[in-house]
Image (cartoon, rainbow, N blue to C red):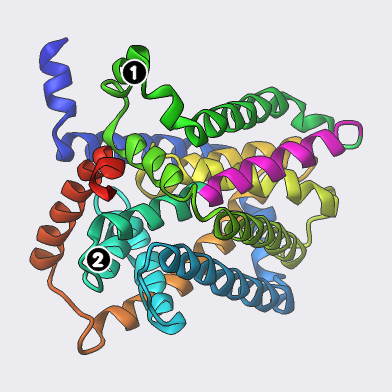
Amino acid sequence: MNWWRAAFRNRAVRNGVKIALAVILLALVFRKVDWPDMARRLRGIDWRFVFGAIAVQWVVILIGNHRLKILLKALDIHLTYWRTFRYTCIGYFFNLAFPGGMGGDVVKAFYVARETHDKAAAVTAILLDRMLGLLAVVMIATVALIATLKSSPAFRPLLPIVIVVLALSFVVGTILLTKNHWEQYGWWRAVERYIPKFVLGMINAMYSYRSHKGIALLAMAESLVLQLLMCVFGWFCGEALHFQAIQWYTYFVMFPVLTLVLTLPITPGGLGVTEYFANTWFERAGESAGAGLAFMLLLRLNMLIMAFSGFIYWILPGVHVSRAELARGTEAIAEEERVLEHLDEAGH
């Protein structure tokens, strides 16, 4: 057992396991696909809805970029909107280019940290940016599931899961907002020793905004708006593929859950996991086998378009850094994440 744990700590082994799992899941999806039906759907794509989906996606990016800008500003990191936009796009590129290793958030933190002496603050803002997005996804999925219980019984098995996640989010959030009270107790310090450093960084990120409640609430509102728009994006993709069995409100259940699955670090970029989930649940909703795979192809195409813009920004003079420089920088960022454990003490 010890040798297995030691082996799995190796990045190459972990990535190998993830890739193998992605291949297995894709194989299971491919075996079920109705290929003639999928080919018919792809040949008959309504490109008006595809371009509509791309337009919605860019509106989402612009809103998300403003969310990050105000979170940075609250910590006295003053970047222009378009400079922040550049780093946001580069993050999208690295999400796709190196999904099993350097994530887009880490790379984005590296670039933002170059703009300030307070690197811990840069990491804090980006961690909270991600956390607010995930919380918005869970909230929308829960409300949509409850609202569509009668009309969409196929999704009922998901309801207990998202309700538990949402309840835990609010309980943990309440505890974190009163963190200074609990720190006087020994059990809190004992629990902190077992919390993964990345999670502890997110905890301290949330707590550090206690004096910026207005900014945090605005960022949360923007998170809800952009996640609702992503559900509209999903509807556009479904209309482009001529889905008949799925009602418009179904996307407000399907897409948030799909987003959660996509962010799970089970396989590189969620490859295989999201295709399996989408194919299974679109079929349960009444579409033909392979509808989910066609939907994911459109989603992956959109991700490629976003990544391409990030690649263009990344190679521009004055922005580009080598992989070796980036690796050294991300190691420094990882060290800053560890510093977040003592963020409150450092701030005094």
Q: Which of 265 and 183 is in front in this view?
A: 183
On screen, residue 147 above or below 6: below
The question of residue 70 being in magenta is answered with no
On screen, residue 335 above or below 3: below
Residue, x 70% and y 76% (percent of image)? 52
Quadrant that contains the N terminus: top left
Residue, x 47% and y 74% (percent of image)? 305
SS majority, magenta? helix
Residue 282 relative to residue 103: left or right: right
Q: Position of residue 39 (x, y in %)?
A: 63, 61
Which of the numbered marks, if any, corresponds to residue 191?
1
Q: Can residue 33 be seen in this view?
A: no
Q: What stretch is highlighted in magenta?
A: 132-150
Residue, x 17% and y 19% (percent of image)? 5
- Cβ–Cβ below 8 Å for labels 1 and 2? no
- The residue pinned by badge 2 equals 113
Residue, x 20% and y 67% (percent of image)? 117
Of the image marks 1 and 2, the number of the one nearer the N terminus: 2
Q: What residue type is labelled 2?
A: Ala
The residues bearing labels 1 and 2 have C-alpha atoms spaced at a distance of 30 Å
- Which element carries disc 1, helix, strand or loop? helix
Q: Which residue lies furthest to the top in this view?
A: 1
Q: What residue type is labelled 1?
A: Val
